[in-house]
Image (cartoon, grey):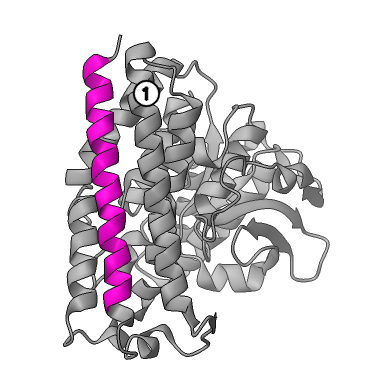
Amino acid sequence: MRAYLFLLLAALVGLGVPPAAEAVNRPARKMIPAITAIDVGAGVEKLQQRDSLAWMTAQTLVYSGVKTNYADLCAISGLSALFMYRFDDPTCAAPSLGRTEAGRCLARGIEHYGRRLERFQWPQSTTEEERLAASRMAWEFILDNIARDRPVLCDYLEGGVLYGYDETQEDPVVFFNTFGPGFGALRRSWFTQAFRREVFDLACIGGEEPGVTAREMLAATLANLLVAADNTGPEGAGSLTAMAALTRDLLDPARDWSAGAAWLGPLVIRQGEMRLCTAVYLRRNADGLGEAARGLLLAAADEYERAAECWRQYTQVLALTNGRPDTRPEASRLADPGRREAMAGWVHEAMGHELRGLGAVRQALAVAQ
């Protein structure tokens, strides 16, 4: 009991749950229905794979009063400049609010808009009693914030937003939405057993300060494109190096893809197609650094869109056999003659377009007025 009381006090003081003196007047039911209807997809209608956590983050930002969309958030945060690939560790590219470089990108992008990601700080727990107490505090964090009209971002499944609850049911529920699996409900009994600090993150978007100027944001985005190409942080090598590693593995006849099948689906395809977000953002902001840089930014946008198209072709080679959908496991399809080589060829061509785009970006920064 003492452990539970200690953890509860820690939550009330430091985790964003209002203390008793400022307790939320929490109704038994609450929904924030408008958030899931916000359209943030302008310019990326052709994408076959979209990052659900980034999509829901963009919707949440718009709900909080920020003028943005999916393409802009992915570009400004640096998410669309990343390409993470480590054959033995698919988690390096998994959706996350704070455990991977992709999650840290989202947090930095939110800060550019003058907001901040207020994460639920899971308390340390060494016993099952403490773990269950921490899960109950996480549940209270969700309900109290929704009661205050603050949607809660979560990296559950493919990442999404918690936007409603119903405590009138015998087993209370919270409601979530993702761009992937879609609408769902998490029952408190299941949540308390499943949610823990080692697996899930929860956060709200807070703060309301002036963000950086559009020019500063553009310059930072361009600089980050160059940085990410060479170095993406502790999870892996630079984006171009990671693409080259994927190409080598596809061409290696000894590589057993049954052990790395996770990389043959959305984990890779989503990252590659996200180059379209960079293209859309560059076109929208081509005038941002002056006339001398304008043509170079438009040229870079063309190259990034061509790179995204190469990744769509990569998807088609993997998904279709003789022009028809192939329902076999992805790893089994790679045994077909020529399929690996064709996929590697599209990755190589995508890299070429990205390199030319980076060259134009470097020139644009050099001539910026």
Viewer-nearest residue: 144 or 80 = 80
Q: Which image quadrant for residue 349? A: bottom left
The residue labelled by disc 1 is 295
Residue located 33% across and 22% down the image: 219
Is residue 163 visible in the rendered structure shown here?
yes
Q: Vertically, is 75 above or below 222? A: below
Residue located 58% across and 35% down the image: 61
Classed neighbour count for the residue bearing mark 1: other residues with Cα under 10 Å, few (<14), some (14–19), many (≥20): some
Q: Vertically, is 128 above or below 168? A: below
Task: Measuring from the top left, give residue 249's x and y in whole percent.
Answer: 20, 74
Viewer-nearest residue: 165 or 71 = 71
Q: Which image quadrant for residue 59? A: top right
Quadrant (top left, top right, bottom left, bottom right) of the C terminus:
top left
Relative to 332, 252 lies left or right? left
Q: Give the residue type at disc 1.
A: Gly
Task: Measuring from the top left, give residue 319's x and y in whole percent.
Answer: 48, 77
Is 285 colored magenta in this rendering? no
Viewer-nearest residue: 22 or 362 = 362
Task: Measuring from the top left, give residue 171's x and y in whole percent.
Answer: 74, 70
- Is the stretch drawn in magenta largely helix, strand or loop? helix
Is residue 199 visible in the rendered structure shown here?
no
Which residues make up the magenta segment?
A: 341-367
Residue located 22% across and 44% down the image: 229
Residue located 69% across and 66% down the image: 184
